[in-house]
Amino acid sequence: MKTTAVILAAGQGTRMRSALPKVLHPLLGRPMVRYSIDTVQKATGEKPVLVIGHAAEAVRQQVGEAADFVLQEPQLGTGHALQQAAARLRGQTDFILATTADMALFTVETYERLLAAHQERFARDPQGCPITLLSVISQDARGFGRVVRKPDGEVQAVVEEAQATPEVLALQELNTSVYCFTADWLWNALPRIPLSPKGEYYLTDLIGIAVSDGLSVQAVAVADPCEAIGINTRLHLAEAEAILRQRINQAWMLAGVSLIDPHTTYIEPDVIIGQDTVIWPNTYLHGSTRIGENCTIGPNSILRDTLVGDRCRVLVAVTEKAILENDVEIGPFARLRKGAHLANGVHMGNFGEVKNSYLGPGSKMGHVSYLGDTTLGAGVNIGAGTVTCNYDGKHKNKTEIGDHAFIGSDTMLVAPVTVGEGAVTGAGAVVTKNVPPHSLAVGMPARAIRKLKDSD
Ligand code: UD1
Ligand code: CA
């Protein structure tokens, strides 16, 4: 039988006090809404339907192909939101998994448990229990609706905090706003939700409707209350982010990665790290960063969309869209910008910046240098203070340096320019013309003054 998820994401999220729609606020680097999309897709095996309304275009753009969209306009409450999916899904699917985009921390297993509980009951009693809801037992009510049970344990109602009597307020079983419905029943019941005094249609009223029809509603409690953090304010956002971070960090530690101080280690969900790599404190691994085995990363490093091979050392560095092959060392105070590619065994020391450049195997750039739009051969030595002058005010020009060239300290390479294989530049050379292979060039502007003795 088929289950399709509907994710409610049309509300503005006024309590965030933000120009950005709530569901697009980043949670560990990804828009909040992506989390529920991914988890329900895995739990149901189907592309979910996302109900959008407030800032619909922005949400649609961020989500792209990952969901189908229905528009809720105007936004008249959670019941009204789910009803917008009726035209799309009626007759198409057997069960509806309804959830909200601001409950981002539920795991695939939790959704699967809810679906299994509903389907198991359905198999025994196809008409008797059209709703299974996911509850959480917690002393911290967080403004959630309270689940009221009958003496026999079945659910009687969900009462919103604003409507609750002191007795109901004291209940510790709370509604997470995640439900599995039998689809045929749902589509017929949604139009029966009454308008609330606040002018909204509450999805929670479906429980009362089922019960008054003499049907059962069952509740399954989430095993780990930490999953049930609804994000309504920026305080909740920070709380959710901390839990997610802890979850990711724990998974990497159990997978064989050492985190010296997990509390100051920020690893985004798509990052991959190899075994026996050690991450030192205050390190941020963003986006699609991948790190190989036996590396040492940090302290104080920020890597974004960076590929790092095995046995690399990254110390106090900031990298973005860069590649480090194996046995590469960078830092302290190294900056790799887009397109920096350091081949096997490259050493890049303190205060270096590399952009859109390839440094061949074993090349060294020890101190205070800038390489932009440059191709280096193997075994090149870049002296302290070397700068590629790659921008003439209009164009970015290329520098090429051959294998085993030795660039003297404080050389200015005025691109476009080529330094041949095995060539040497003197300290302070300003290289404006190509330097032939195996030649020594000095001065300003640098001229090749002689062929090197030990060359062929
Ligand atoms: C809701 C539940 C409450 C539950 C809590 C758990 C209702 C009436 N209340 O309250 O019982 O304890 O979730 O988190 O359902 N949305 C729309 N269209 C709308 C209104 C809301 O799509 O017209 C979406 C929002 O974008 C949000 C979700 O529905 O993702 C929940 O709305 P929200 O206003 O946050 O409901 P809560 O007050 O948290
Ligand atoms: Ca909410």
Image (spheres, rainbow, N blue to C red):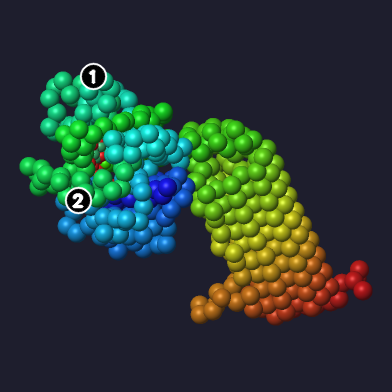
Picture residue at 59% right of the left edge, 47% below the top: 272
- Label 2: which secondary element: helix
Residue 37 appears left or right of 403: left
In front of the other: 253 or 67: 67
In front of the other: 120 or 166: 120
In the rendering, which numbered label is found on residue 133?
Answer: none
Of badges 2 and 1, the one in the foreground is: 1
The residue at label 2 has a CB less than 8 Å from ligand 1: yes
Residue 435 appears left or right of 314: right
Neighbourhood count class around disc 1 (C-alpha, 10 Å): few under 14, some 14–19, many 20 upward: few
Do the residues bearing badges 2 and 1 touch, measured as CB atoms within 8 Å? no
Picture residue at 61% right of the left edge, 70% below the top: 373
User: Which image quarter has ligand 2?
Assistant: top left
Residue that label 2 marks: 80
**Residue 292: image x %, image y %?**
66, 47
Q: CA distance from mark 2 to mark 1?
A: 31 Å
Residue that label 1 marks: 151
Q: Residue 153 sits in which quadrant?
A: top left
The residue at label 1 has a CB less than 8 Å from ligand 1: no
Residue 447 versus residue 53 in the image, above or below: below
Which comes before the other along the chain, label 2 or label 1? 2
**Residue 185: image x %, image y %?**
26, 45
Picture residue at 14% right of the left edge, 28% below the top: 164
Picture residue at 64% right of the left edge, 35% below the top: 256
In front of the other: 420 or 28: 28
Quadrant where the image shows the C terminus: bottom right
**Residue 5: image x %, image y %?**
36, 49
